[in-house]
Image (tube, grey):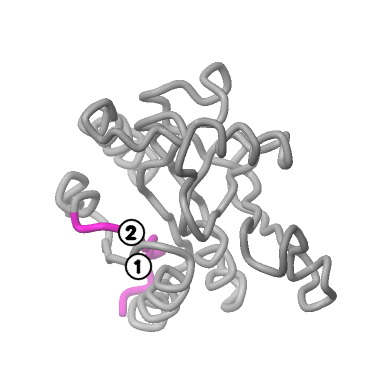
Amino acid sequence: MSSAAVTLVLVPTELEARRLALTHAPLELCGFGLARAGVGAMHAIARHRPQRVVLAGVAGSYDAELAPIGAVLAPGLVRCHGVGVGDQTPADLGFADSDEAALDGQDGLALSVARASESLDQARSRRAAEPRAVLEEMEGYTVALAAMTVGIPCTMLRAVSNMAGDRDLAGWSLDPALDALRERLDSMLAS
């Protein structure tokens, strides 16, 4: 392996991988959802031994002003939601030090969920319970833990394709969101 710094880009789905089509950095599928993404991230990190991990993909917005459709955000924190017992998280139960992980970013908090909001009402309820959250996504927390485990920084770039809880894919802005994500990722990797 060369001494050049390696940034490993992880994406949850084939769609995101195809649309990003990176040639100037290794790009790997980490998988969709919390469990698969954590395992996939550890496997890819072991194979590439990067100095930095970037998780890239789409997400739903909890707040159209802070996270408008088409925006690309780099949250500074990710919080695990929906894993535990009832409303108690692993940290609440004493099984973890924290339900949050720091990221290299400044765009608020992303909520990593085990199951996406099924309705706009459910998304509003989650946001009310986690008022700092601006995004809903499904992989960031475990990818951040994988990076923390080996002592490397993790950045999450999420392009907003829809409002959290909107399950009508026909109304999502996937193409423009992925185009904006590719542009931001290219700029990040070039610096």
Residue type at numbered disc 1? Cys
Q: Is residue 101 above or below residue 128?
A: below
- Residue range (magenta): 1-14
Q: Where does residue 90 sit, x and y in percent of width and height?
A: 74, 70
Residue type at numbered disc 2? Pro
Q: Are marks 1 and 2 in contact (CB under 8 Å)?
A: yes
Q: Earlier in the sequence, mark 1 or mark 2?
A: 2
Numbered label attached to residue 12 = 2
Q: Quadrant of residue 130?
A: top right
Q: Where does residue 111 sit, x and y in percent of width and height?
A: 59, 48
Is 114 situated left or right of 167 in this image? right
Is 45 situated left or right of 135 in this image? left
User: Which one is nearer the viewer's eye here, 18 or 27?
Assistant: 18
Numbered label attached to residue 30 = 1
Q: Quadrant of residue 127?
A: top right
Q: In 3D space, how far apart are the residues under numbered discs 1 and 2 (Cα atoms)?
A: 5 Å
Query: Which residue in the rendered view is the most extreme toward the top?
Result: 65
